[in-house]
Image (cartoon, rainbow, N blue to C red):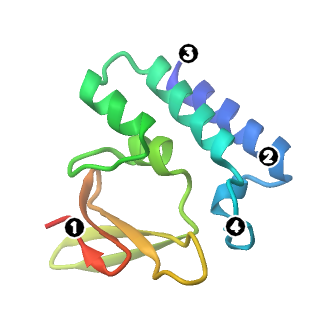
Amino acid sequence: MNKKLFFVVILSLCAAASSCARSLSMDPLHFWGNAGVKEDKVRREAYAATHAELTQEQKTKILAGEIWKGMSKDEAIASRGLPHDIWRNFTDNKELEKWIYRYDYYYPENFLVFDRRSLVDWQQGWERRGK
């Protein structure tokens, strides 16, 4: 299964489950309970199974929903899902994207920062972990 077909299948599953292209786990109104956990597991397993170029360590991290410095945007989507917002910055001749995830009402947003190709920084809750 190629990458394009993989994302078409995943988006179709999300659309069928929630009547839009976002999974329930990313909907700020569904942060109580385990809404979307099954979708997350299916998305992660499908990506790991269809990408032979991934190392075993990368597959294990994606299946666990983890992130790491240098991961691609496709790997981040497989691991964490689609972000709620994407902010783009152009500074110091760099193009950076900040992917914002909002998981629940009480905790601050989490974000991932990408350069053109890979993850360079992130913050989870109050703690900055990428650098």
User: What is the distance, in whole Å, between disc 2 and disc 3 at their CAs?
Assistant: 20 Å
**Between disc 2 and disc 1, whose residue precedes?**
2
Q: Amino acid at mark 4?
A: Trp
Give the residue number, with chain letter if any, for mark 4: 32
Q: Amino acid at mark 3?
A: Met
- 2 or 1: mark nearer the eye: 1
**Between disc 4 and disc 2, whose residue precedes?**
2
Residue at 45% from the left image edge and 25% from the top image edge: 48
- Could you say where residue 66 lies in the image, as x and y percent from the top left? 36, 47
Instruction: Give the side of residue 20 with respect to residue 63, left or right.
Output: right
7 is higher (above) or lower (below) than 120: above
Give the residue number, with chain letter if any, for mark 3: 1
**Between disc 4 and disc 3, whose residue precedes?**
3
**Between disc 1 and disc 4, whose residue precedes?**
4
Give the residue number, with chain letter if any, for mark 1: 129
Residue at 70% from the left image edge and 60% from the top image edge: 33
Give the residue number, with chain letter if any, for mark 2: 15
Helix or strand or loop: what does disc 3 sit on? Answer: loop
